[in-house]
Amino acid sequence: MGRFFTHKVGDLTLKHKCSVCGTVAEFDYKPGGKLPPNFPFCSARCKSIDLGKWFGEEYKISAPLPNADLMADEEKEALAQFLLDEGEVDEITNEEE
């Protein structure tokens, strides 16, 4: 779904379908602002269910990321540092070693 439409000048009302339960969540968004804490899910419950599926290996990335080999080493290092700083990952390991 993920359709955008203008709510008022500069603000958007976004509708997004939860991939776990199918509920359509609607929220106001100001460009540059924060998304709801459970986005892209409708609730903490659905967010936890999705995380459980990743932990249970129901979901997995089964193919290498496209064009990852096109990144320069400096870009890879910058991305790794950004992910660490943002708390998106706890540790970066070098798969080539």
Image (cartoon, helix red, strand yellow):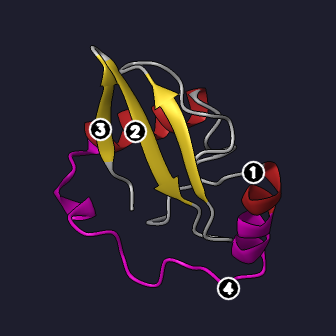
Q: Of the residues shown, which amino acid type is indicated by label 1? A: Ser
Tell which circle, 2 or 4, labels the residue nearer the N-terminal end.
4
Instruction: Give the residue drawn at x 61%, y 41%.
Output: 88
Q: Of the residues shown, which amino acid type is indicated by label 3? A: Phe
Secondary-structure class at tag 3: strand
Quickly name the residue at label 2. Answer: 79
Place residue 12 in its image quadrant.
top left
How many residues crowd mark 4 within 10 Å: few (<14), some (14–19), many (20+)?
Answer: few
- Report the mark closest to the observer, 2 or 4: 4
Instruction: Give the residue drawn at x 80%, y 50%.
Output: 44
- Report the mark closest to the observer, 2 or 1: 1
Q: Of the residues shown, which amino acid type is indicated by label 2? A: Leu
Query: Vertically, is 54 above or below 29?
Result: below
Q: Nearer the viewer, residue 91 or 23?
A: 23
Quickly name the residue at label 1. Answer: 43
Q: Do the residues labelled 2 and 3 touch (CB within 8 Å)?
A: no
Q: How far apart are marks 1 and 3 (CA)?
A: 22 Å
- Report the mark closest to the observer, 1 or 3: 3
Secondary-structure class at tag 2: helix
Q: Do the residues labelled 3 and 4 touch (CB within 8 Å)?
A: no
The magenta segment is 49-73
Tell which circle, 2 or 3, labels the residue nearer the N-terminal end.
3
**Residue 59: percent from left, percent from top:** 61, 80
Query: Vertically, is 31 above or below 94?
Result: above
Quickly name the residue at label 3. Answer: 5
Instruction: Give the residue drawn at x 61%, y 70%.
Output: 22
Q: Distance between the residues labelled 2 and 4?
A: 27 Å
- Report the mark closest to the observer, 4 or 1: 1
Quickly name the residue at label 4. Answer: 58
